[in-house]
Image: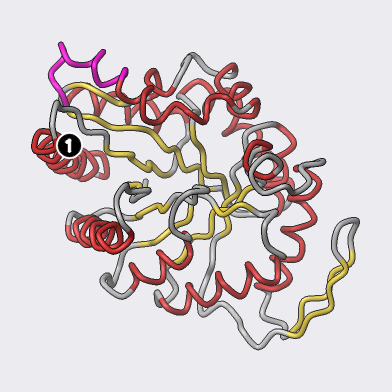
Amino acid sequence: MRFGVMIGPERGDSARKAARMLDDVRWAESAGMDTAWIPQVPTDFDALITVALMGTVTERIELGTAVVPLQPQHPIALARSAMSAHAATNGRLALGVGPSHHWIVKDMLGLPYDKPAAFTRDYLEVLNAAFAGTGSADVENATFTVHNPLGLTPIGPLPVLVAALGPVMLRIAGEQADGTVLWLADERAVGDHIAPKITKAAEGAGKPAPRIVAGLPVCLCRPDEVEEAKARANRILGEAEVSPNYQRLLDAGDAQDVGDLAAVGDEGMIAARIQRFIDAGVTDVSARLLPIGDNRDELVASKRRTREVYAQIAADLRK
């Protein structure tokens, strides 16, 4: 098992935001976290640049993107950026990618969102060719015709994880990548839907068991504050639920919204919820630390308490 935290997106001006994110990744490494996951959202920092920046203040922790949208850039451009960040972090990048959602790709960027699974399959073929270290990426498929010399090679293993929610995407992730990065997948969705399908696909392709990274909000609070914590999760993290992709994933489990997904309550309640994810087949937990409070001081104190308890739970569950 690997335990990690999400870092960002952050509010505020860019200079302060960068400093806070660096403080958070320093804490994550010092607290024994295995991974730190940087979301790529339309309104915030570039995730791969952030990974490279975080590499300058850390030495051990794996730094992952969760996830880089594929449509806005050519796979060779993404491969160059990823291998550059991988080298800058001394081989600690985990590249999370995905076809994003129609409301980002089509409505915000004005790009086509046709057949996202087929696009992802073809994109990964180019990306894998670029990472193969042969000196050239040569791929011709339905989407790309690429014959591109490359002087860059990954300096070590560079895992690629795909945001795969449905059966077709899970098969692609299992066959062509190293695992999946999830959001809004509860224990039943993981155990009954995600883990069996991606594992079967990986086995059929002769690949090792895939990583399954579960993102979930975590909030330390009193039992009588659980509903307040869930309501806060729905208020600040619930916008993604409008996506049909996420709606189908929710339908595969028992959770109705992100609040239902959250691991909230006292230390025992949080540990028990995380253990259920592990039992369902999760290999990585990516915690979105969720503070509660009525003002900034209370929110800061809540986040600090939550992260210290989460670090202890991680240490206990590794034993």
Residue density around tag 1, few if under 14, some if 14–19, many if 20 or more, within 10 Å: many
Quadrant in which residue 283 is drawn: top left
**Residue type at mark 1?**
Thr
- Residue at position x 18%, y 24% in the image: 268
- Residue at position x 61%, y 32% in the image: 196
Residue 127, x across and y down, in percent: 69, 65
- Name above or below for residue 43 compared with residue 146: above
Instruction: Report the residue that reaches farthest toward the bottom.
Output: 151
Residue 263, x across and y down, in percent: 30, 26
* In-front residue for pair 175/111: 111
Asked whether, in this view, residue 83 is left or right of residue 23, the answer is: right
Residue 93, x across and y down, in percent: 46, 65
- Name above or below for residue 281 compared with residue 222: below
Determine the main secondary structure of the stretch shown in magenta: helix
Q: Which span of residues is magenta-colored?
A: 221-231
- Secondary structure of the residue carrying tag 1 is helix
- Residue at position x 66%, y 34% in the image: 197
| Color theme of the render | secondary structure
**Residue identified by numbered label 1:** 306
- 291 drawn magenta: no
